[in-house]
């Protein structure tokens, strides 16, 4: 487990994924394995540890792709992803992404959600709220990727 406080991802994390996009091979991975562990996985693990008391245990997804049934045989994912409660965090060469929501809702939950969206009162609130959200990608701040 990573025992340092989360301070964001260094620029080397983005550079790692830029390099992996250019050369998604076992040779590249082996040559940059330490960079992945220290500059990519280490900060993600520190972030999940820092947020554990509020959101519960996080889980980092494996970096290897399942290529058994895929036409694309690239061995590695071009991002690191993790779940934390109902939230998802991802870092790639494009920057940082975070999302939250529900996956595989029960039929009654989905029905209630659809009714709320279709309702003139709550649905209208959503129509007003949604366009006001600012959807941006956070690239770097001071050479580090953070929020």
Image: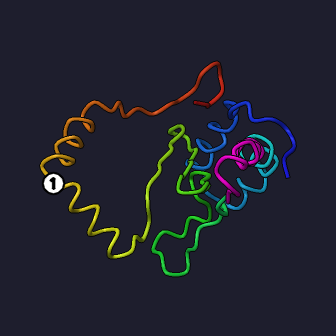
Residue range in magenta is 42-59
Q: Is residue 93 left or right of residue 115?
A: right
Q: Residues within 10 Å of mark 1 (few under 14, many from 20)?
A: few
Residue sitting nearer the eye, 81 or 24: 81
Residue sitting nearer the eye, 80 or 15: 80
Q: Give coordinates of residue 68: x percent, y percent.
A: 55, 80
Magenta-drawn stretch, dominant element (helix, strand or loop): helix
Q: How many marks?
A: 1
Q: Is residue 55 magenta?
A: yes
Identify the residue at the far top of this view.
142
Identify the residue at the far front of this view.
121
Q: Give coordinates of residue 12: x percent, y percent.
A: 70, 34
Q: Residue at image x 73%, y 58%? A: 27
Q: Is residue 54 magenta?
A: yes
Residue 83: name its quadrant.
bottom right
Q: What is the basis of the colouring in this image? A: rainbow
Residue sitting nearer the eye, 23 or 52: 52
Q: Is residue 80 left or right of residue 131?
A: right
What residue sits right under mark 1 in the picture?
A: 119
Q: Is residue 136 left or right of residue 13?
A: left
Q: Give coordinates of residue 126: x percent, y percent.
A: 24, 43
Q: Give coordinates of residue 114: x percent, y percent.
A: 23, 62
Q: Residue at image x 23%, y 56%? A: 116
Q: Residue at image x 53%, y 57%? A: 86
In the image, residue 115 above or below residue 1: below
Q: Quadrant of the C terminus?
A: top right
Q: Secondary structure at mark 1?
A: loop
In the image, residue 77 above or below residue 131: below
Identify the residue at the far bottom of this view.
69
């Amino acid at each position: 487990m990573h025992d340092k406080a989360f301070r964001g991802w260094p620029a080397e994390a983005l550079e790692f994924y830029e390099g992996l996009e250019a050369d998604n091979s076992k040779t590249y991975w082996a040559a940059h394995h330490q960079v992945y562990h220290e500059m990519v996985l280490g900060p993600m693990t520190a972030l999940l540890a820092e947020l554990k008391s509020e959101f519960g245990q996080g889980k980092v997804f494996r970096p290897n792709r399942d290529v058994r049934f895929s036409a694309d045989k690239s061995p590695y994912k071009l991002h690191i992803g993790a779940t934390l409660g109902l939230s998802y965090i991802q870092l790639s060469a494009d920057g940082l992404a975070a999302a939250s929501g529900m996956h595989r809702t029960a039929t009654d939950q989905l029905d209630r959600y659809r009714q709320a969206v279709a309702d003139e009162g709550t649905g209208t609130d959503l129509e007003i709220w949604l366009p006001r959200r600012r959807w941006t990608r956070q690239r770097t701040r001071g050479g580090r990727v953070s929020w």
